[in-house]
Amino acid sequence: MQEELEKNVCNVQITVSDDETAAYICVGTPGVNKEYTVESLVALAKDAGVIHGVNTEILKAILVKKAFDKTVKFAQASPAVDGKDGWYEFLFDTKIDTKPKILKDGSVDYSEYGSVPSAVEGEKLVIYHPPVACKDGINVYGGSILAKKGKDLARLKGKGFVIDETNTVYTAKYDGKVTYIAERLVVDKELVVEGDVSYTTGDIEFQNDIHIRGNVFSGVKVISQKGSIIVDGYVEQAFLSAKKDVVLKNGMQGNGKGSIEAGGDVKGKFFEQSQIICKGDVNANAIMNTRIESGQDIIVSGKYGVIVGGSVSAMRYISANIIGNMSEVRTEIKAGVDGDLFAMLAQCERNKEESEKALKTVTDAIEKVQQVMDKSNSPELSKKRMQLMRSKIECDTKVNEFAKKEQEILEQMGKANLAKVTINKVVNPGTVIVINGVKVLVTEENHHVEYSRRGAGIIVYNIGE
C-alpha cells in the first residue's frame, strides 16, 4: 500500500511509494483560465518533498498530450548498487574423488586413483578477487539508500605455498600435490619415480607421498615416512611401508617374500603369496595364498572376488564372492579378535591404576623434598630431587601408555562386536572360519551365506542371491 503525500494545489495530487523509490503525479483537468507548466509541476513536487529523479520529459508529455486525471510515475530513485563479496578462483580441480571406481562387473578400478592435481614450483594455484565496492542510492526525497558492502575474505590457511605482495596470488612453494580440503590449501611434496624401482635404482625412502609410475621389482624397499605409496605397475618380492595408504593399481606377486605395511588402507587388483599388515581396510579383486592382518575390513569384489589359501584376518568385517576352491585348499578366515578383550581391558586398567598410584607417591615425595629445599638447599637434596623427577617421567609415560592401550582395546571391542564373514556366492570345504576366537570348519559347499558370532558359537544364515 502506498503512503500518500498529497499536495492538492491547483488540482494536482502527488504520492510516493512506501519504499520511497518512486513518485507519482495525477494532474487534474485544469479549470477555466488555468494553465499548468512543467516548472509549476516541478515546484509542486518540491513542495511535496520530491526533489530527486524527477523526469521533466514525463511532465512535459502529460501537458502536451493532456493526460489529465491519470496517475503517472514521474520520479524514480537512483538504486543502490550492492558490493560483491571477495572470492577465490581456484586454478585446479578441488573436487577430486580419490576412491577407486567400482566397475559394472563389481571389480575395482584403481587406474584413476592417485590422480590428484600436481603443481610445479612457482605455479599459480589460487587468485583472490577482492570485494567490489558498493554504491549507495538516492531516494526521491534526496535521502540515501544504503547499499550492502562486499565482504573481504580471510587469507587461505595451509602450507606449501607463497602469497604475493598484493595478497591475491597464491603460488606453489615447491613441486608437489595440491589439494583444498576442509578450507586448507596444501601443497605436499611428492616423490615421483617415472620408471621402475629395482636393484639398480636401490631402495627408496621419502618423508611424504611416493608415486611410482612403473613397477617395483624384487629385493627393494619403498618407505614413505608420513605419506602414501602409489604404484602404477606391478610389485614383486618387495617391501612397501607407508604411514598412510598403499595403493597398487595392478597387484602384487610376492612369491612368499613380498610384504606391505600401512597405517591406513591397502588397495590393489590382486595380492598373491604376500603379507599385508594395515590399520585400515584391504580392498582387492583377488587374494591368493596371502597372509593379511587388517585393522578394519577386508573387501574382495569383482567378477571373481576370490580368497584362496593363506590366512586373512580383519578386526570387523570380511566379504568375498568365493572363499576357497574345489580342491579344498586350506583357507583361514578370521573376523574379530582371538583373545578375551574383557580380560585384557581389566588387566590394562589394573596396570594403569598401579602406575597412577606410583605417580602420586613420587609427586608427593617431590613436593616434600622441594619444601625442605626451600628452607635449606643442599647438593644431596638436589640429587634426590633429580632422581624423583626421572621416576616421575617414567611413571607419567607408563600411565599414558596404559591409557592409550585402554582406548585401543575399547575401539577393538567396538569393532569386534560387529565381526562377521559374508560370502556372496560360495564358500568351499577346507575353509576355516574364526569369529572372535570361535572356530568352525566348512565341510560342504555353502552358497550366499553369512557367518556371525552368537553367544558361545557361530551361526550361519542365508543372505539370498
Image: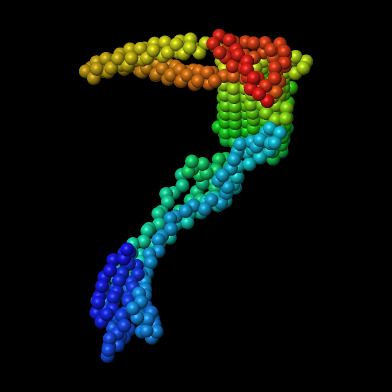
Q: In the displayed structure, would residue 338 be above or below residue 89?
A: above
Residue 159 spot, x, y in % from top left: 50, 42
Query: Can residue 64 be seen by looking at this rendering?
Result: yes
Q: Measuring 57% from the left and 31% from the top, which residue is drawn there?
A: 244
Q: In the displayed structure, would residue 37 be above or below residue 70?
A: below
Q: Measuring 42% from the left and 13% from the top, which residue is drawn there?
A: 349
Left or right of 417: which side holds 442?
A: right
Q: Measuring 31% from the left and 86% from the top, which residue is drawn there?
A: 37
Left or right of 253: which side holds 336?
A: left
Residue 241 spot, x, y in % from top left: 61, 27
Q: Measuring 51% from the left and 46% from the top, which residue is drawn there?
A: 161
Task: Tell which residue pokes out farthest to the right in this image.
Answer: 327
Residue 115 spot, x, y in % from top left: 63, 41
Query: Can you say which quadrant of the picture contains the C terminus?
Result: top right
Left or right of 137: which side holds 410?
A: right
Q: In the displayed structure, would residue 351 be above or below residue 121?
A: above
Pick the residue in front: 442 or 414: 442
Task: Tell which residue pokes out farthest to the left in this image.
Answer: 375
Pick the residue in front: 18 or 213: 18
